[in-house]
Amino acid sequence: MKNAFFLVTTLIISLFLLGFAVRGRSGIPIYFQTNRDTGIGSPFEGTNSSSRFALTESIVKSNSLFLNESLAAFSSPDISKINGKYLSIFTPGVSLIGVPFYYLGSIFNLQQLTTYLSITLLSLLNIFLVAKLASKLGAGFYSSILSGFLFLFATNAYPYAVTFTQHQVSVTLIILMLLNTLQKRGILSNIIFGFLLSAAAIVDIPNIILSIPILIVVIYKNIFIEKSEVFFQLKQSLKRISMLGIFIGLVPITGLFLWYNYQVTGNYFKLAQTQGRAIFPEDPQLSQSHKIENETVTRSKDFHQFESRRQLNGLGVLLFSRDRGLIYYSPVVLIGFISLFWIIRSKKDSSLASLMLTMIGINVLLYSMFNDPWGGWAFGPRYLIPSFALLCSGLGILLDRLKKNIFFLILLCLVALYGIFVNTLSAVTTVHIPPAIQAVHLLTPIHSDFRYNLELIQKNFSGSLIYNVYLFDKITSTVFLAIVTGVSSCFVIASLIVFSISKNRQ
């Protein structure tokens, strides 16, 4: 009964917090949906969301994988141009997920709201997937659920739960693949794994690289059997046959991906990203304020996204810089790192923790070589959100072990509340913040970190739909921020207090 109560309470509070972060402004039916305003605080403020949404709309309304001029201007500069036709520069996974939700929204004339809802629902699911992963590491029920809650609301996963981007989808698929590796290998589990792997690829190509360690483990488990087992040769043969399940699972989504590539680029294996970006000619009514006037295309021969010479600078950006460093935005994950490292050092079966740390290392090293480790106009190190999910899953182990240690509980509480405040700032205002190297060149310079979000709050600005429609004339945005932050903070504090005084590990 206590477990069910805690689970339901977590679900209700999470829905409350996600609901208050949904973007919008009053209008018929919603201002941003009807006017396509790409200003600060809009669900369309970042073209990494609007370009994907444009593809979803083009599929539903025009039965086309290409963008008309209106949608191209709306999505620029996150578009490519091939044979005179514009297309989203991103792989189509997120856009395809949004298609049934767009159809659903058409019934109520709320297409944008329901399309973005697909990512928000996956974000809610990720709380419990992180909790499930934590339990597989050995954490108790309460500490596992709290780990999932801290992932979503004490890291910059929170503001990206209400965008139409790949980060939360990647988390869902990566954790599902990790959980799949723990299952006994058979043709069904292999088919599911192949399906998840191909889905991760169509959502975001770097997911393939992040998933390599998981793939190696799955293949190893399919070909290795202890020779002491009876009927070894027979089992070996059956397991090798079951490996065909991986390829069977790969076929549907991979086939769809190859077909998409052929339709838009004329080559099954050519990605839109390799063509570079095309800036649509400026249209005062449709283009965003930061676009340049004349159309320019980055040539594919100059397209180099990952280079090792960028690594030192990229590591500084992702880990330590004030505008994107994880220590400024999501310091709670550092405790998760300590926890995973402790598992490896102290437990006999630490294969899952070792696998997770390997994936985290790949994630950090990969994007430290990226040509844009800042993630464009973004909030925090958004490329590391999958790693944050894995790191937070380790929190429960340390919490179980040190729940009577007052100093640890205070430390965890402080870093958690700090992360909640910083990321709630973004969730109720904007994720559209320039990196320092661009902010200094703006006509009106702005901060390149969450101080910009603070300034917006002080100006009584919020991007929250609920605030703008129902609360704007009743309370200030500062009070609104305090309410949203207070709810999540009180839940964390109460959970830690109850957990620390409980007699047994739950």
Image (cartoon, rainbow, N blue to C red):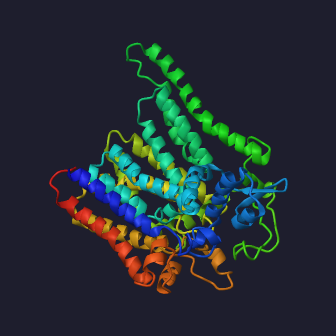
What percent of the width, then of the height, locates residue 14?
Answer: 37, 61
Q: Could you tell whether 59 is left or right of 504 in the image?
A: right
Q: Could you tell whether 141 is left or right of 390 in the image?
A: left
Which residue lies most toward the right here? 83
Which residue lies most toward the front here? 107
What percent of the width, then of the height, locates residue 221?
Answer: 47, 29
On screen, residue 30 above or below 66: below
On screen, residue 312 above or below 240: below
Q: How many labels does the image show?
A: 0
Q: Can residue 334 be seen in this view?
A: no
What percent of the width, then of the height, locates residue 237?
Answer: 50, 17
Residue 40 picture quarter: bottom right
Q: Looking at the image, which residue is at 69% across and 64% down?
A: 75
Front position in the image: 491 or 212: 491
On screen, residue 500 above or below 176: below
Q: Looking at the image, which residue is at 43% across and 65% down?
A: 19
Q: Looking at the image, which residue is at 61% across and 74% down?
A: 434
What percent of the width, then of the height, locates residue 160?
Answer: 51, 63
Q: Could you tell whether 26 is left or right of 334 in the image?
A: right
Front position in the image: 71 or 225: 71
Residue 280 picture quarter: bottom right
Front position in the image: 186 or 30: 30
Q: Looking at the image, which residue is at 55% across and 31% down?
A: 246
Q: Can residue 17 be seen in this view?
A: yes
Residue 258 picture quarter: top right
